[in-house]
């Protein structure tokens, strides 16, 4: 990974399942240009990891905290992680 790479791990809770939230996250990631993954966790949480430049990742965080119109985010947690360059694309993972 280049020195400009940045990585975050995000958890959002609220009305984020059965509303197209993961599809929204994937679309946002593709538009913004970050790589990583997204998945459902439990009944009210979506988890995602994203890598890109700081500017791309900041834009992605804002999109995830907003979500699609049919959703609402009650709470979000964002943690910085060491970038690995392990993700060639952005994909959906199996729910946990």
Image: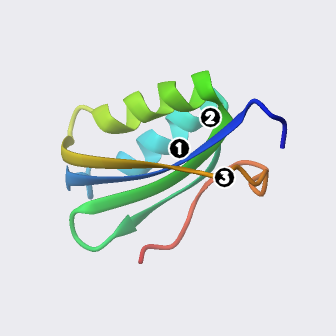
Q: Which numbered tag is attached to residue 26? A: 1
Q: Residues within 10 Å of mark 1 (few under 14, many from 20)?
A: many
Q: Picture coordinates of residue 86 (x, y %)?
A: 77, 57
| Left or right relative to 92: residue 89 | right
90 over 28 or under it: above or below: below
Instruction: Give the residue drawn at x 38%, y 65%.
Output: 40
56 over 40 or under it: above or below: above
Q: Nearer the viewer, mark 3 or mark 1?
A: 3
Q: Nearer the viewer, mark 3 or mark 2?
A: 3
Picture quadrant of residue 84? bottom right
Report whether residue 67 is seen: no
The residue carrying mark 3 is: 82
| Left or right relative to 43: residue 86 | right
Q: Picture coordinates of residue 18 (x, y %)?
A: 26, 57
Q: Which numbered tag is attached to residue 30? A: 2
Q: Which numbered tag is attached to residue 53? A: none
**Looking at the image, which residue sits at the far bottom?**
96
Picture quadrant of residue 70? top left
Mark 3: secondary structure? loop
Mark 1: secondary structure? helix
Q: How far apart are the alpha carbons under marks 3 and 1?
A: 21 Å
Are circles 2 and 1 on residues that touch, CB within 8 Å? Answer: yes
Q: Picture coordinates of residue 21 (x, y %)?
A: 35, 47
**Label 3 vs 2, first from the N-terminus:** 2
């Amino acid at each position: 990974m280049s020195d400009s790479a940045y990585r975050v791990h995000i958890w959002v809770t609220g009305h984020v399942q059965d509303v197209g939230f993961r599809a929204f996250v994937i679309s946002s990631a593709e538009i913004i240009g970050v790589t990583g993954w997204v998945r459902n966790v439990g009944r009210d949480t979506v988890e995602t990891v994203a890598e890109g430049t700081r500017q791309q990742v900041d834009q992605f965080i804002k999109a995830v905290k907003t979500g699609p119109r049919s959703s609402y985010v009650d709470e979000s947690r964002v943690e910085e992680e060491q970038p690995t360059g392990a993700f060639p694309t952005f994909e959906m993972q199996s729910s946990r």
